[in-house]
Image (spheres, rainbow, N blue to C red):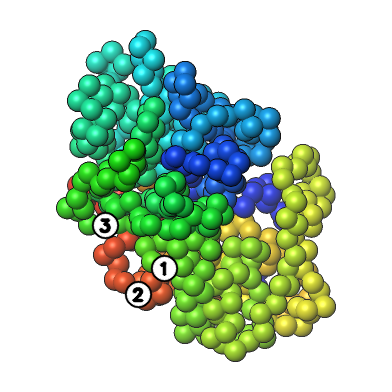
């Protein structure tokens, strides 16, 4: 077995695909406390969906106000800032950029204003697939852009159609934009939510008495004590105002295509998407993976922390001990490690530390939810071998990424993908493992209890919903 002793420069990065954004909004908050604190808590619950910037927009007596900045939620909002917000309707957002660079201008929500004091604010999770076309068209028509984000394109379109009424403006905009969007917009007295016809990104409605909530994930509703009412349906526009919640569009006449990787990696394990709890889906995939593992093993080790649910399912199905044999330092943020070999190796130890007494002489399987560049897998394999493990096998609870995502997920381009057609054994050797086993697409569908037809699976199938004419299978 060929082993890699060198530590890669990227080793401090998680090398996971990254979600674009999270949205949280509250309408008609009646207390206790104030709506900004509740929105802050909702955004904290969605922090895993975006760590670059955070923001809130709210309706005040002088129009729509905005607070936003770069960094994590608790870095952007101070207690005095939140206490100063006097509003009962607030739109919040956490961002990770896939379209548009990481800078304060692109932080959301974005606001559009008129001279007569009218304003609207928009926040969105997803990625448009006809951004360039719309951007060029709007530029030719005289539009000035202040950001490089596709969110501004959505806002610009709604704003220019606003005289027809906001509902009609959103409807018209939805006919022109393509791709993935789960969006929320506020004006002075309404909250609007709309979701693309394929329903790539999740968006749920919650309620406590007469207060409504919108959130990217149910875990955020749980955090603020709201009950789940339902999802915003693909293609639907929902308005929430003094007359309550009104649905303005029927179901879309296209195939539902929820991103299957919301279950694999992006969403929190305690969230429920389309009726399925994320942890239980991951655990079920782990159980099904048991039928594909051919090696004799002594123990199952979760890759911390992303492999925990699947590892539980695999260990249970194989009737093997599940051991937290690698400790991950949860307090490691950015580290200013010099790029020397010695310091990089120390940095690895700072992040991960195997428990030698558990793994010495054992045949172990390390379970992770997905494999992109294989950097974390390579590190863990190397550390477990150094700690005395006799064999290290990798079990990945999703099929290999083969294709890029155009719907709001940052996955390395094809040339960087860990999986290659050279075969699993070569891949295992590149990582330094004895073997590697991936889940098959059928395992995900069985775990979800549906066929493939309800999901986007493009990053492993190459079938891009809504982009059939431009089918992009790249490897
Ligand atoms: S291409 Fe992959 S990551 Fe992107 S939306 Fe589809 S399933 Fe999700």
Question: Above or below — where is 434 with respect to 218?
Answer: below
Q: The C terminus lies in which quarter of the figure?
A: bottom left
Nearest the eye: 271 or 462 = 271
Cα gap from disc 2 to disc 1, whole angstroms: 9 Å
Q: Is residue 369 left or right of residue 446?
A: right
Nearest the eye: 473 or 266 = 266
Q: Which residue is mark 1?
A: 276
Q: Which residue is mark 3?
A: 256
Numbered badge on residue 216: none
**Element at label 3:** loop
Q: The N terminus lies in which quarter of the figure?
A: bottom right
Residue in view at x 58 percent, y 59 percent: 374
Check if mark 3's residue and mark 2's residue have beta carbons within 8 Å.
Answer: no
Q: Residue 79: x, y in percent?
A: 68, 34
Check if mark 2's residue and mark 1's residue have beta carbons within 8 Å.
Answer: yes
Q: Is the C-beta of the residue carrying label 2 under 8 Å from the nearest atom of ligand 1?
A: no
Q: Residue 398: x, y in percent?
A: 46, 67
Q: Which residue is mark 2?
A: 449
């Amino acid at each position: 077995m060929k082993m890699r002793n060198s530590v890669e420069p990227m080793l401090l990065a998680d090398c996971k695909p990254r979600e674009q954004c999270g949205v949280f909004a509250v309408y008609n908050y009646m207390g206790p406390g104030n709506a900004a604190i509740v929105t802050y808590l909702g955004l904290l619950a969605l922090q895993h969906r975006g760590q670059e910037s955070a923001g809130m927009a709210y309706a005040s007596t002088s129009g729509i106000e905005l607070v936003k900045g770069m960094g994590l939620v608790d870095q952007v909002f101070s207690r005095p800032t939140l206490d100063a917000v006097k509003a009962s309707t607030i739109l919040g957002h956490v961002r990770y950029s896939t379209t548009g660079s990481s800078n304060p201008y692109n932080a959301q929500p974005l606001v559009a204003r008129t001279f007569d004091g009218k304003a609207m604010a928009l926040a969105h999770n997803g990625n448009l697939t006809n951004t360039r076309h719309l951007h060029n068209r709007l530029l030719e028509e005289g539009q000035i852009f202040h950001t490089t984000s596709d969110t501004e394109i959505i806002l610009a379109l709604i704003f220019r159609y606003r005289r027809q009424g906001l509902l009609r403006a959103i409807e018209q905009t939805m006919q022109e934009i393509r791709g993935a969007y789960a969006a929320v917009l506020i004006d002075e007295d309404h909250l609007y939510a709309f979701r693309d016809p394929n329903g790539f990104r999740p968006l749920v409605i919650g309620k406590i008495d007469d207060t409504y909530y919108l959130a990217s994930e149910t875990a955020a509703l749980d955090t603020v004590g709201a009950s789940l009412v339902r999802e915003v349906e693909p293609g639907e526009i929902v308005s929430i105002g003094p007359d309550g919640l009104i649905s303005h569009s029927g179901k879309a006449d296209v195939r539902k295509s929820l991103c299957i990787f919301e279950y694999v990696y992006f969403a929190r394990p305690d969230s429920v998407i389309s009726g399925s709890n994320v942890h239980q889906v991951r655990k079920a995939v782990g159980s099904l993976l048991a039928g594909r593992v051919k090696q004799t093993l002594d123990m199952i080790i979760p890759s911390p922390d992303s492999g925990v649910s699947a590892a539980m399912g695999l260990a249970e199905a194989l009737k093997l001990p599940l051991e937290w044999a690698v400790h991950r330092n949860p307090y490691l943020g950015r580290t200013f490690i010099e790029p020397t070999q010695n310091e990089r190796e120390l940095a690895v130890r700072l992040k991960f530390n195997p428990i030698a007494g558990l793994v010495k002489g054992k045949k172990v399987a390390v379970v992770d939810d997905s494999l992109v560049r294989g950097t974390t897998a390579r590190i863990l394999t190397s550390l477990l071998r150094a700690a005395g493990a006799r064999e290290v096998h990798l079990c990945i609870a999703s099929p290999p990424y083969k294709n890029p995502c155009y719907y709001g997920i940052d996955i390395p381009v094809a040339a960087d993908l860990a999986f290659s057609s050279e075969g699993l054994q070569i891949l295992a050797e590149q990582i330094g493992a004895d073997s590697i086993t991936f889940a098959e697409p059928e395992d995900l569908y069985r775990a979800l209890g549906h066929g493939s037809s309800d999901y986007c699976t493009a990053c492993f199938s190459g079938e891009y919903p809504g982009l059939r004419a431009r089918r992009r299978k790249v490897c």
